[in-house]
Amino acid sequence: MSAASPVVQLDDVHLSFKGVKAVNGVSLHVEPGELFAIIGPNGAGKTSLFNVISGVYQPQEGRVRFQGQDVLGRKPSDIARRGVARTFQNIALFEHLTVTDNLMLGRHQHIGYGWLSAFAWWGRAKREEIVHRRSCEEIVDFLELEQWRGMPVGLLPYGVQKRVELGRALAMEPKLLLLDEPVAGMNLEETEDMARFILDIRDELDVPIIMVEHDMGLVMDLADRILVVDFGTPITTGTPDEVQRHPDVIRAYLGQELSS
Amino acid sequence: MTTTAERSPAPTGRTGTTTPVTRIREHARTRPDAVALRDKHLGIWREWTWTHYWDHVQLAGHALLALGVEPGDRIAIHSENRPEWLVSDMGAMTVRAASVGIYPTNPAAEVAYLLEDSGARVLIAEDQEQVDKALEVLDRAPQLERIVYVEPRGIRGRYTHEKLMSWEEFLELGEKHRSAHPGAVDAVADAAEPDDLATLIYTSGTTGPPKGGMLTIRNVEFAIKVLAEEGAFTDPPPGPDDLLLSYLPLSHVAERIFTTWFNASSATQVNFAESIETVPQNLREVQPTVLFGVPRIWEKLMAGVEIRIAAASRLKRANAQLWLRVAARIGDDLVRTGGVHTASTRLRYAIGWVFCYRALRERLGMRRVRYAASGAAPIAPEVLKFFMGLGVPMHEVYGMTENTAIATANRPGRVKLGTVGEAQPGVEVRVDDATGEILTRHPGVFAGYWRKPEATTAVLDGDGWLHTGDVGEWVDGTHLKITDRMKDIIITAGGKNISPSQIENELKTSPYVKEALVIGDGRKYLTALVGIELDTVGEWAQRRKLGFSTYRDLTEKPEVVDLVRSVVNDVNSRFASVEQIKEFRLLPKELDHEDGELTATQKLKRSAVTQTFEEMVESMYGGGAR
């Protein structure tokens, strides 16, 4: 693994809200093709870190670099355009739109035609639409969404909605994917499906991933490296093996009984 | 092993043996640019011309030769329906090897059994899931030399096993072999004999492990002659204008007939469903002309109509209900006439066509269906009548792997509801006087079970009669009615013989019931285990603002139990008192192939289910607490 060109790099990031330290000196870097996980108890600052990377929160201190460029202070829309896509803990989809329409929305930033030619449905609009529709179909195929293509998202089972949300993030053709609790609330079968998709995204689509997740089994199985945070403070970073053996982690996060 | 060689002449008089492969070659010559197959890629239907299909069959044949496959070897195929399935199957046949279909849902343990038992040398595995199963059990199938995977996703770059090979590499290998040895495949194909093993079709095995039914080229060609060329099902026989949707497992004899063999013989166009879940959409897109379904499919389509009407606006609902009532009466009349329209049914249907039937059939994907059939398991007459009333010409047919699915069929215009129809032309069907067992004898009777001579002699007697294990009787001397599987007949403590499947099928006619198992062998009265249909009962509960979390939770709602009770009471009213269900319980989980409760063809394994839910069963007979 070359430390030369990490996809994303955080250096000593501090973020606080009215005196509450949400992120306290976190540094991390994610390499191309890496599946990086962030774990920690509730309120440990995991989602805050996501919000820092995607530009929703502005940290008071530290540096955030994406593909070698400083993105601190950039607007979320600008960072999204640079190729950071994310999914949310709570599903954020357009319930009344179909699966395909939701995916097409993910293509938004790649759409180059104006409203006038879209209205006239002529020339560039038509040509581009076919290209975008094709890439949405590739995602339908990739995430096995065929049977729900034309259905309003609101009517679909929870696990499928999560998959559609992932699909919408993929439709952006991201350079980095942030997954916020991708399997929360899923049953075993849905979790296994999702795990398979996450691995395929890393391996087949070659998209690096940062994942926040509570399901320890999933994290330990999938992640290349793990960052453990507690009350905003980094405890350690390492491979699943290293993290599981780390005494502070056992104490702070996994509980005492595991060490006995 | 008995052979069928002495009993019948070769099916054709041409030089060389006609096989499905030579038929495909002929289509490629006479109609090179016509569409043979269609599959959906990225949401768009993609066409395979006969030239393209034949080219791939040849490449697969050359590749198998390059891998050292010899006549008589077995090639296993573990995949959903897709063009590569047919290419592999026919590719094997071009080099006189036999295909072995494995159900996509088969868990690793069964895959191990099938690979070991068949002794397959090459496995065509669809994707990572199926490759994983094969790699897991490789030590039990040491003779397996190659695993060819069709979908590289998740495998390429991640797996390094030396037996793995991608579909592209497989075709490239064929390409190289073809340039080095042009004509090698044709030479082998032209040497085919009627007694060549064409395929092993493993029976679902509701008891014991699956057995591989050996079908020879003679068997297959007889099926083609009777069912396709002579049109024992459809009238007129299937032809190039017919469209079919391929969606049931090709490892089953029925789908093999309707997909592969109809296509090879009559140049029908095969459309592959994207998956079993997308069948309703794909039906609408394709609008097939010939449609075969198993009872479960027809029940689900019928339930779909009822559910959609219940959810429609009031005006639409009233309109649909009115015309469905008319359709029910048209269905009644058609049942009386054997499926022949009268002036009165024609008139009612024509008016209904304008207001309802045309739109409904379009939505169901049955607008153009000229022949529909149900088979592979018993079906409730109500379901057939429902579709007949809608103008879908519905026919129940009967056959099994062991007779290449050739036995009886309801012929268009001579339908007798509740029977499986008349014997096919040129086929002997007999009901044993003593036992009531149905026997068949014809050139389609299989060559025996693979490597199981005792099992073969148990079903195939010295005179060439196949003992089907089904009990039946003649209705009006022409039509055969099947009572039940011989081993499933219930004899109650009172000594009464009862056929559970009839009661079960009546229960399953309800849109809310997915599975039903009637119990009562050696007992004082009948009871039932009922599995609810999650979709419909879930929606029913939601409409009543009944919250539920899981399947099990839903089955424990008193309202749901009451709902099923009303279904049971309704069915009971149609049966004599000894045949009525006195108690029932709802199954707490959906039955599953992987848990060993269903066979690969989704048939219920009675003993496994009663064993798993033994306490529940005993509680209905006063034992054990619930």
Image (cartoon, helix red, strand yellow):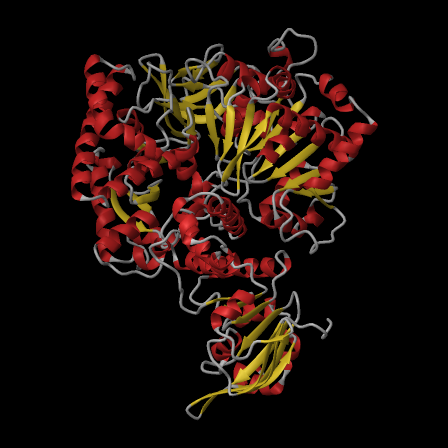
Q: Can residue A239 be seen at all in this image of the molecule?
A: yes
Q: Position of residue B98 (x, y in %)?
A: 66, 29
Q: Position of residue B212 (x, y in %)?
A: 60, 32
Q: Quadrant of residue A244?
A: bottom right
Q: Quadrant of the C terminus of chain B?
A: bottom left
**Residue found at x 59% / y 87%:** A248
Horizontal side of residue A201 vs A95, given as left or right: right
Coordinates of residue A88 in the picture (x, y in percent): 44, 68
Residue at screen point 37% across, 32% down = B365
Horizontally, is B620 left or right of B51 in the view? left
Residue B525 appears in view: no
Above or below, A260 relative to B528: below
Q: Quadrant of the N terminus of chain B?
A: top right
* Picture layout, residue A87 above or below residue B580: below
Percent across and percent down for residue B430 are: 44, 15
Q: Which residue is at 24% across, 43% downward?
A: B568
Quarter location, residue A67: bottom right
Image-based side of B357 in relation to A145, left or right = left
For the residue pair B30 and B576, the one nearer the viewer reads as B30
